[in-house]
């Protein structure tokens, strides 16, 4: 299967859904009427309420809703094969996600731009409204952590330990020596031996050959050059271990020794540079040359591309070490950025950054769609992967229900409901525009998810898993990974294990192996598509095309990071406002968004929450939490708009929202149950160890389990109160009809 037919088919289905299904919802369910004034017109204050042309607002809304979810989720779900994820994206976005966004937008627009929590208070009562507010607050923190972890994994360096008793067998050549930092430079072609077991004869006695016990071990060739950091000597605090090679050029890896994975100075610099660029663009548009939007756009775009190119020089220069950050340092940097962006006035950083990113996002997506059609890459991944249908290295769970919480934003995302009931309903000029902005922008996000799935599926399977599997877990999954390709069983272990990571690293100037989280995998997949498309339409030499790889890759990384960081700064600000609203019920001063002590304290608490989650949990755990939280918010949003539909007398069309609500409720509740079982097992296992228990592990399991239970309870309260309100509304209408 090649990508072009898939892309054309997806575009056709989305066009049909927009033309007919969204028109049906607009006419029968939402009953849009341009004769009815919108809040933007009726309450126009040129600040919060301001009529905005349809396509400008479309760009603003799309930039606000499009985070990392539609990019990363499909890449991770490609583990199950490309077809299950593709079907969920296409069906989910047309019948679920776009419907939710559209109807939440209409509900907020009809209520003077009120937030989702405020609509809940009005439509389902005080109890349901309070539950909605608390659920939204928890969900925002968890969602921001999930998005932030993607950036951390893509940019930050880390240290990885191989299984105990593992050893290295070197190829021919000089033996490595330890350097001043206590690390060995391990040559390419080294073989890792692990999972060693002593072999026994029929009599149960250990087998011996040449005076040595016969040891059976699994082997894994490592194709690239890498560094092994020796453990510190407790007495001196300095590296104290060594590698001792025997006559067979084999050395046992000392306990505590770890493989060093460098950070990405180029990527970190490029993304960091977009912050002063956005500050300058904001200053230019609002202070230096007010109203000169086109000039500011051209300058901003040129500077952003310039930063991507300049990153190559920075990475090689001494100053590049400043941008070679560990994962913890990247987390701190994001926390500082999130705090500053949420406290500063919107026009200083948030608005110009969103403005720049909206152009970049829409333009890049257009290029990817066109590039996919031109390149027409072969989909190397299986349509359905039986090997990992029960869980694998990228998604540790069964295809049902974990596919549905791994791919969120590309199909349906509760987080969008916060945007659809935020600034967008205060800016709609005509009611009819809600169809294009609400339904259409979500279809665009679904298209982003499809492109991400194609980019991941177009990579050779060994390359996909080499980048997307944590190095420490490679020995655990390696044999099953080699089964995915199929048709290569006749090859020896070394031939079956071959991948292109070393070549990718040469082309991109980055360390790519063992970068779970999907961002690096997607960037390489995008670079593949751009490269193949360029080769078909360009007359440049092969050498020139290869030289472009590093720019394709780092542009893709910046593209992904901008998706995420625009959500982090906006989400942190929304969380700050919600927390101030909660605190305002205790002390009215906290409810004032212009009271600096309240603004600073609320922002610090929100940032500390998501930063702690990022730094204290692995990617798989955070992404599952994010998926459960996000989809529970979708259930809440669909429950609220269902109440709106029924309360407005159009209950016969409630199936439009109840159908996706039921699907998302079943899949998310099942996933939450599986996760609770896992967390309980972790807590119980550690508790049984007594004094030897890992207190940090027990605390994390308890906290995460408590949050999952809280989200389930909040959702249950909203479902019950919403159903009660619907039944009462139906009873009143039935009584009124019978009375007539």
Image (tube, rainbow, N blue to C red):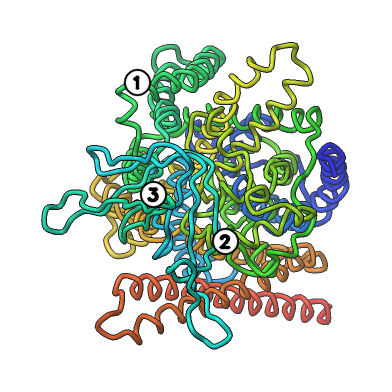
Q: Is residue 262 above or below residue 141?
A: above
Q: Residue furthest front?
A: 210
Query: Is residue 161 in view?
Result: yes
Q: Which mark is residue 259?
A: 3
The image shows residue 414 at horizontal and vertical percentages of 60, 57
Q: Which mark is residue 627?
A: 2
Q: Which residue is mark 1?
A: 317
Identify the element where label 2 is drawn.
helix
Q: Residues within 10 Å of mark 3 (few under 14, many from 20)?
A: many
Q: Is residue 17 left or right of residue 344?
A: right
The image shows residue 218 at horizontal and vertical percentages of 55, 62
Q: Residue at x 78, y 59 (%)?
A: 384
The image shows residue 220 at horizontal and vertical percentages of 55, 54
Query: Is residue 118 in view?
Result: no
Whichever of labels 3 and 1 marks the residue nearer the N terminus, that label is 3
Q: Residue at x 78, y 17 (%)?
A: 537
Whichever of labels 1 and 2 marks the residue nearer the N terminus, that label is 1
**Given contact means CB atoms under 8 Å apart, are the residues at marks 3 and 1 in contact?**
no
Label 1 and label 2: CA atoms lie apart by: 40 Å
Whichever of labels 3 and 2 marks the residue nearer the N terminus, that label is 3
Of labels 3 and 2, the one closer to you? 3
Q: Residue at x 34, y 39 (%)?
A: 325
**Given contact means CB atoms under 8 Å apart, are the residues at marks 1 and 2 in contact?**
no
Of labels 1 and 2, the one closer to you? 1
Q: Is residue 108 above or below residue 445?
A: below
Residue 542: quadrant of the picture: top right
The image shows residue 459 at horizontal and vertical percentages of 69, 42
Of labels 3 and 1, the one closer to you? 3
Label 3 and label 1: CA atoms lie apart by: 24 Å
Q: Is residue 526 left or right of residue 148?
A: right
Q: Residues within 10 Å of mark 2 (few under 14, many from 20)?
A: many
**Given contact means CB atoms under 8 Å apart, are the residues at marks 3 and 2 in contact?**
no
């Amino acid at each position: 299967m090649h990508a072009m037919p898939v892309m054309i088919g997806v575009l056709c289905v989305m066009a049909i859904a927009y033309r007919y299904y969204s028109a049906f919802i607009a006419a029968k369910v939402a009953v849009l009427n341009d004769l009815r004034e919108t809040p933007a017109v009726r309450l126009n204050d040129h600040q919060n309420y301001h009529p905005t042309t349809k396509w400008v607002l479309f760009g603003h809304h799309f930039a606000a809703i499009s985070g990392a979810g539609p990019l990363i989720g499909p890449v991770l779900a490609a583990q199950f094969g490309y077809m299950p994820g593709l079907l969920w994206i296409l069906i989910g976005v047309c019948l679920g996600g776009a419907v939710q966004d559209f109807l939440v937008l209409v509900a907020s627009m009809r209520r003077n731009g009120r937030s989702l929590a405020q609509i809940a208070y009005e439509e389902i009562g005080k109890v349901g409204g309070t539950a909605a507010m608390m659920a939204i607050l928890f969900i925002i923190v968890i969602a921001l952590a999930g998005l932030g972890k993607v950036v951390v994994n893509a940019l930050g360096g880390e240290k990885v330990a191989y299984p105990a008793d593992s050893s290295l067998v070197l190829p021919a050549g000089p033996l490595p020596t330890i350097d001043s930092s206590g690390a060995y430079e391990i040559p390419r072609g080294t073989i890792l031996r692990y999972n060693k077991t002593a072999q026994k004869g029929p009599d149960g006695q250990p087998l011996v050959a040449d005076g040595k016990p016969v040891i059976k071990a699994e082997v894994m060739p490592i194709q690239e050059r890498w560094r092994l950091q020796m453990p510190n000597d407790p007495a001196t605090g300095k590296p104290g271990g060594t590698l001792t090679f025997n006559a067979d050029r084999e050395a046992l890896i000392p306990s505590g020794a770890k493989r060093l994975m460098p950070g990405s100075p180029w990527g970190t610099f490029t993304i960091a540079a977009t912050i002063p660029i956005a500050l300058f663009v904001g200053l230019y548009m609002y202070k230096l040359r007010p109203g000169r939007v086109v000039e500011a756009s051209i300058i901003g775009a040129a500077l952003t591309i310039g930063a991507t190119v300049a990153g190559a020089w920075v990475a090689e220069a001494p100053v590049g070490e400043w941008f070679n950050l560990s994962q913890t340092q990247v987390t701190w940097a994001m926390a500082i950025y999130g705090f500053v962006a949420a406290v500063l006035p919107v026009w200083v950083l948030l608005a110009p950054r969103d403005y720049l990113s909206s152009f970049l996002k829409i333009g890049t997506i257009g290029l990817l769609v066109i590039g996919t059609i031109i390149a027409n890459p072969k989909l190397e991944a299986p349509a359905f992967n039986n090997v990992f249908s029960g869980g694998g290295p990228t998604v540790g769970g069964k295809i049902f229900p974990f596919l549905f919480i791994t791919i969120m934003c590309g199909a349906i995302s509760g987080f969008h409901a916060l945007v659809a009931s935020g600034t967008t309903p205060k800016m709609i000029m005509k009611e009819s525009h809600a169809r294009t902005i609400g339904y259409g922008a979500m279809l665009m996000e679904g298209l982003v998810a499809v492109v991400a799935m194609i980019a991941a599926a177009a990579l050779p399977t060994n390359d996909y898993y080499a980048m997307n599997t944590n190095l420490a877990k490679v020995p655990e999954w390696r044999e099953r990974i080699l089964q995915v390709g199929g048709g290569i069983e006749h090859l020896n272990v070394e031939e079956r294990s071959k991948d292109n990571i070393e070549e990718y690293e040469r082309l991109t100037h980055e360390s790519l192996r063992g970068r779970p989280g999907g961002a690096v995998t997607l960037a390489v997949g995008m670079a593949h598509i751009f490269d193949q498309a360029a080769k078909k339409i360009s007359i440049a030499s092969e050498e020139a095309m290869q030289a472009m790889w590093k720019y394709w890759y780092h542009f893709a990384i910046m593209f992904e990071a901008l998706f995420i960081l625009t959500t982090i700064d906006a989400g942190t600000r929304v969380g700050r406002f919600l927390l101030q609203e909660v605190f305002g019920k205790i002390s009215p001063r906290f409810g004032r968004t212009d009271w600096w002590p309240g603004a600073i304290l609320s922002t610090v608490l929100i940032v500390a929450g998501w930063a702690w989650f990022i730094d204290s949990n692995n990617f798989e755990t955070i992404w599952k939490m994010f998926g459960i939280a996000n989809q529970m918010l979708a259930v809440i949003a669909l429950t609220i708009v269902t109440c709106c539909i029924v309360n407005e007398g159009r209950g016969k069309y409630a199936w439009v929202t109840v159908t996706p609500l039921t699907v998302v409720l079943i899949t998310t509740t099942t996933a939450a149950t599986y996760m609770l079982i896992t967390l309980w097992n972790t807590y119980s296992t550690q508790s049984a160890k007594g004094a030897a228990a890992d207190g940090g592990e027990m605390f994390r399991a308890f906290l995460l389990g408590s949050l999952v239970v809280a989200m389930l309870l909040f959702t249950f309260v909203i479902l019950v109160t919403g159903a009660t309100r619907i039944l009462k509304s139906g009873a009143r209408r039935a009584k009124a009809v019978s009375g007539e």
